[in-house]
Image (cartoon, rainbow, N blue to C red):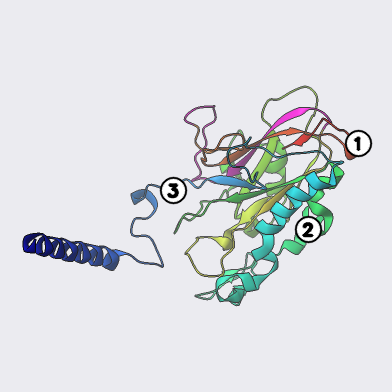
C-alpha cells in the first residue's frame, strides 16, 4: 500500500513539473510557432457571415423573403456578429485603443484601427442587411494569422491576367496610396450568357485596407469587413457565387478537391482566398409559401 502511495506521489510530481515546464514556454500575446513554422501557414482563409446556426444542416443561407420570422433569423445572426463593432464596451479594454485610420496614418503602439459599421449603406443594421427586400448582403472577412503581412498589387503592371476587368479599372482609378488593399471580387462561379447575379455593390470599399495589417493580437482589434450587396439577383434561380481575395501572397487554386485560395459556403471545410455562395432568390412581393431564398 505504501508503495502505491509513493508511486502516485512521484507520478503526480513529475506531471506537475512537466506541466510547469510547458506553461513557461507559452506566451498569451503571440503563438510560439508562427507563419511558415505553424500549421496555419501563411495563406489566410476567407470566411463569410451570416452562417447558419445549425452546424449539421446545409451550409447555406435559406429564407423566405416574405416571411418575417425567416428574415429576422438572419438579421439576428448578423446583429450578434456585428455587436462588438457596434458596441465597443463588449471588447477587451472597452475598445478605448481604437483609432480612426487612413492610408496616411501612423498607428501608435498599442492602438488598433477601428472599423465603422455606419459606412455600410444598404448593408447596415438599419436596412436589415437587405434581407427583407430580396437584396441580401454577405459579409466577407479574412481569417486572422498572427504577424501575416499582405503583399499588395501596387504596380499596375503586376495585376494578374485573370483579375476581373471591373476590379482592374477600379484599382487604376484610385490614388497610388489607396491601392494598398487586399481586393475582393465576386462573380458567378459558372458563367452563363444571362447575368443571373445582377449588379454587385461592395461596402464600405472593395477591399481590406493595409492599415489593418499585420494582426498582432492587440486587444480591441476587429477584423475589417467587406459587405457584398446583391442588389438584384434573378428570382427563383440557383446562382453559384465565388468571392475571391486578391493579394500577391494569397494562393488560389479552384476545384472541388484540394482547393486552396478558397472557402466553400456549402462545405464545412475552410480554405483560403475565396468564398463560394449558392443563391436562390424569391422576391417578397410574390408571398411564396414553399419557396425560399438561399445564399
Q: State if disc 2 and disc 1 touch (CB < 8 Å).
A: no
In the picture, measured across the screen, residue 197 lies left or right of residue 45, that is right
> Residue 126: x and y, percent?
82, 59
Distance (Cα) linking label 2 and label 3: 33 Å
The label number, if any, that marks residue 125 in the structure image: 2
> Residue 252: x and y, percent?
52, 37
Q: Which residue is mark 1?
A: 287
> Residue 60: x and y, percent?
66, 37
**Marks 1 and 2, the one that precedes in the sequence:** 2
SS for dot 2: helix
Residue with the most extreme left position: 3
In the picture, measured across the screen, residue 40 lies left or right of residue 181, that is left
Q: Residue at x 38, y 60 (%)?
A: 31
Q: Nearer the viewer, mark 1 or mark 3?
A: 1
Q: Which residues are magenta?
A: 234-258
**Membership of 249 in magenta stretch:** yes
Q: Nearer the viewer, mark 1 or mark 2?
A: 1
Q: Nearer the viewer, mark 2 or mark 3?
A: 2
**Membership of 109 in magenta stretch:** no
Number of residues whose C-alpha sits closer than 10 Å to that of mark 3, classed few (under 14), some (14–19) or many (20 or more):
many
Q: Residue at x 62, y 68 (%)?
A: 104
Distance (Cα) linking label 1 and label 3: 47 Å
Q: Residue at x 49, y 40 (%)?
A: 251
| Pick the front one: 13 or 95 | 13
Main secondary-structure element of the magenta-colored stretch: loop
Q: Would residue 176 be visible to someone looking at this image?
A: yes
Amino acid at each position: 500500500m505504501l508503495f502505491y502511495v509513493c508511486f502516485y506521489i512521484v507520478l503526480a510530481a513529475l506531471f506537475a513539473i512537466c506541466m510547469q515546464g510547458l506553461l513557461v514556454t507559452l506566451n498569451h500575446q503571440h503563438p510560439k510557432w508562427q507563419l511558415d513554422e505553424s500549421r496555419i501557414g501563411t495563406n489566410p482563409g476567407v470566411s463569410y457571415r451570416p452562417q447558419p446556426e445549425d452546424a449539421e444542416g446545409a451550409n447555406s443561407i435559406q429564407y423566405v423573403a416574405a416571411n418575417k420570422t425567416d428574415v429576422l433569423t438572419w438579421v439576428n445572426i448578423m446583429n450578434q456578429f456585428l455587436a462588438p463593432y457596434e458596441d465597443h464596451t463588449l471588447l477587451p479594454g472597452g475598445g478605448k485603443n481604437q483609432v480612426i485610420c487612413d492610408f496616411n496614418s501612423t498607428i501608435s503602439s498599442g492602438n488598433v484601427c477601428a472599423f465603422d459599421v455606419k459606412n455600410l449603406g444598404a448593408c447596415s443594421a438599419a436596412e436589415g442587411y437587405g434581407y427583407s427586400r430580396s437584396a441580401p448582403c454577405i459579409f466577407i472577412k479574412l481569417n486572422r494569422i498572427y504577424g501575416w503581412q499582405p503583399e499588395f498589387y501596387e504596380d499596375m503592371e503586376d495585376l494578374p491576367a485573370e483579375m476581373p476587368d471591373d476590379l482592374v479599372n477600379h484599382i487604376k482609378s484610385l490614388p497610388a496610396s489607396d491601392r494598398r488593399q487586399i481586393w475582393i471580387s465576386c462573380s458567378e462561379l459558372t458563367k452563363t450568357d444571362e447575368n443571373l447575379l445582377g449588379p454587385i455593390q461592395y461596402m464600405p470599399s472593395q477591399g481590406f485596407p493595409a492599415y489593418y495589417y499585420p494582426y498582432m493580437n492587440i486587444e480591441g482589434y476587429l477584423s475589417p469587413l467587406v459587405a457584398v450587396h446583391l442588389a438584384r439577383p434573378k428570382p427563383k434561380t440557383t446562382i453559384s457565387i465565388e468571392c475571391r481575395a486578391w493579394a500577391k501572397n494569397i494562393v488560389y487554386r479552384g476545384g472541388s478537391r484540394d482547393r486552396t485560395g478558397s472557402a466553400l459556403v456549402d462545405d464545412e471545410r475552410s480554405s483560403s482566398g475565396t468564398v463560394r455562395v449558392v443563391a436562390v432568390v424569391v422576391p417578397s412581393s410574390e408571398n411564396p409559401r414553399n419557396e425560399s431564398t438561399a445564399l
